Image (cartoon, rainbow, N blue to C red):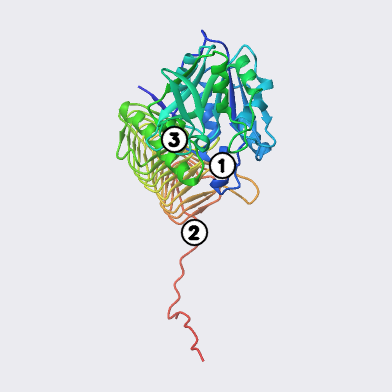
């Protein structure tokens, strides 16, 4: 069994429905965030808020996504374009920002009349793909479909006014009377509609309201007037329509997202010591019988094979961990672009660091305060304490002593160290690359090795010990 956890569910494409075009509103400044970074680029699980929306949209098989930018438009566009992947993404700029209706008006010329339009907000990251699918099914290319939710305290939200099963109006909080403000069903800011109809309704918007803005919600009354049915899909989870307007709300959604991921992991058999103390900031693939202790962070793409155990307070990024391997507490593995691969039955940590290009074979031991970078260690090799292996090839059953290093950098270029099978490197040795240690050779403790060694030999390179009789240490001068 393999589990891919990234917080997004895959769904079949909308083959039986009209093509879907998405409008994502991403023009707001986010003043309450108190940040120079635009609101839609604030990070949740290490991905911009708008990036989560794009990831969800990708699973729906949409035709194109029109992103409406405004505040710091160039920065937003530059950040989102690399996240588009196979999505057909285009940008339009809303200048000035005159409300949600005006934002969609700005996007309208880019929408195809034969499409269904799905309107989303770039700061609402936790809407499930299944919920959007249900909304599109409800619209069916004919109706105006609204995403709603019941809130016990709906202050600030547009209220859903019904006539039986149909919606007849959305009233913004500032424009609502006392009886309307008592309604607990609110509009979640997401809708689906036939494009040709939506364009007509958008052209009729006015700003005659308390805020002097063009409300997207006014399309409801135009649809009703035109005899188009307005339907609501009520979701069960308020988090699906929760936006981010402050650091507090961002932190709340971060924990909600992580708890969703934790539940998915546990439902598929992963053992978590505490689901409230887990952070997945990318893609985590887990096989059977994986155990993860508290306060662990997973970034990029991490693969954990059968029976892997991760100790507390570890950070793993862009790595593949083989079956039965134990990663002990406070280990930091960061594969970056090159990746890190760890073979079956390895033992890593505590307080170990594996950097990009590290490749560890079966039963390799990397102990406390050992750093490995761009190095291949063959089966059974060990570096148990206080060591550095950089730009190295290490053979089977090598023992690399405490305090020893490969001196791989000459100040301008990196050089490689080759340590053949069954070599024993004593403590506090320096291997000055480029250098090759022959199979089965031994390096005496405290040696600085600058030349290749012959297989099976003992090699010692250190200054002669000198003892000076009657020597006295300097003493501090008395203060005046």
Q: Earlier in the sequence, mark 2 or mark 1?
A: 1
The residue carrying pointer 2 sits among few (fewer than 14), some (14 to 19) or many (20 or more) residues within 10 Å by Cα, namely few
Name the element at disc 1. Answer: loop
> What residue is shown with label 1?
416
Name the element at disc 3. Answer: helix
**Distance between mark 2 and mark 1 Cα atoms:** 22 Å
> What residue is shown with label 3?
181
Q: Is residue 31 above or below residue 474?
A: above
| Residue 113 shown left or right of residue 168 in the figure | right
Q: Earlier in the sequence, mark 3 or mark 1?
A: 3
Tag 2–tag 1 contact (CB < 8 Å): no
Point out residue 340 in the picture as x, y percentages from the top left corner: 48, 35
**Distance between mark 3 and mark 2 Cα atoms:** 84 Å
Nearer the camera: disc 2 or disc 1: 1
The answer to whether one can see residue 128 in this image is no
> What residue is shown with label 2?
462
| Residue lying at the far bottom of the rendered structure | 480
In-front residue for pair 18/214:
214
Which corner quadrant of the image does residue 332 belong to? Answer: top left
Point out residue 459 in the picture as x, y percentages from the top left corner: 47, 50
The residue carrying pointer 3 sits among few (fewer than 14), some (14 to 19) or many (20 or more) residues within 10 Å by Cα, namely many
> In what quadrant of the picture does the N terminus appear?
top left
What residue sits 50% from the left and 45% below the top? 246
Nearer the camera: disc 3 or disc 2: 3
Point out residue 167 in the picture as x, y percentages from the top left corner: 47, 21
**Distance between mark 3 and mark 1 Cα atoms:** 72 Å
Tag 3–tag 1 contact (CB < 8 Å): no
Q: Earlier in the sequence, mark 3 or mark 2?
A: 3
Nearer the camera: disc 3 or disc 1: 3
């Amino acid at each position: 069994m393999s589990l891919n956890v990234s917080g997004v569910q895959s769904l079949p494409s909308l083959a039986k429905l009209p093509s879907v075009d998405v409008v994502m509103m991403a023009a707001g400044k986010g003043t309450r965030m108190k940040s120079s970074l635009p609101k839609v680029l604030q990070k949740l699980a290490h991905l911009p808020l708008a990036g989560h929306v794009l990831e969800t949209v990708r699973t729906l098989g949409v035709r194109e996504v029109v992103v409406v930018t405004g505040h710091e438009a160039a920065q937003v566009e530059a950040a989102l374009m690399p996240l588009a992947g196979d999505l057909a993404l285009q940008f339009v700029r809303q200048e000035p920002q005159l409300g949600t209706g005006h934002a969609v008006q700005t996007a309208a010329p880019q929408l195809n009349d034969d499409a269904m339009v799905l309107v989303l907000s770039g700061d609402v990251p936790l809407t499930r793909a299944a919920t959007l699918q249900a909304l599109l099914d409800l619209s069916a290319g004919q109706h105006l479909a609204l995403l709603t939710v019941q809130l016990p305290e709906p202050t600030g939200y547009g209220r859903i006014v019904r006539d039986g099963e149909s919606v007849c109006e959305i009233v913004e909080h500032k424009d609502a009377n006392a009886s309307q403000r008592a309604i607990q069903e609110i509009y979640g800011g997401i809708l689906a509609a036939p494009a040709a109809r939506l364009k007509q309704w958008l052209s009729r918007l006015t700003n005659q309201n308390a805020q002097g803005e063009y409300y997207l919600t006014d399309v409801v009354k135009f649809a009703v007037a035109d005899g188009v049915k307005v339907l609501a899909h009520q979701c069960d989870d308020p988090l699906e329509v929760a936006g981010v307007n402050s650091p507090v709300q961002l932190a709340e959604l971060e924990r909600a997202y992580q708890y969703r991921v934790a539940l998915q992991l546990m439902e598929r058999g992963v053992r978590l010591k505490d689901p409230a103390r887990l952070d997945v900031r990318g893609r985590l693939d887990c096989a059977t019988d994986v155990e993860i202790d508290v306060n662990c962070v997973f970034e990029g793409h991490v693969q954990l094979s059968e029976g892997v155990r991760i100790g507390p307070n570890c950070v793993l990024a862009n790595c593949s961990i083989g079956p039965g391997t134990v990663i002990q507490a406070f280990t930091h593995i960061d594969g970056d672009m090159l990746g890190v691969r760890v073979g079956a039955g390895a033992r890593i940590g505590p307080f170990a660091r594996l950097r990009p290009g590290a490749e560890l074979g079966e039963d390799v031991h990397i102990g406390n305060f050992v750093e490995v970078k761009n190095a291949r260690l063959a089966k059974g090799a060990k570096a148990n304490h206080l060591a550095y292996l950089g730009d190295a090839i290490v053979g089977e059953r090598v023992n690399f002593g405490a305090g020893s290093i490969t001196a791989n950098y000459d100040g301008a270029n990196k050089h490689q160290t080759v340590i053949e099978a069954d070599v024993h490197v004593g403590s506090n040795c320096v291997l000055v690359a480029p250098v090759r240690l022959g199979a089965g050779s031994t390096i005496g403790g405290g040696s600085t090795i600058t030349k290749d060694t012959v297989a099976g030999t003992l090699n010692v390179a250190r200054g002669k010990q000198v003892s000076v009789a009657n020597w006295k240490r300097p003493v501090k001068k008395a203060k005046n």
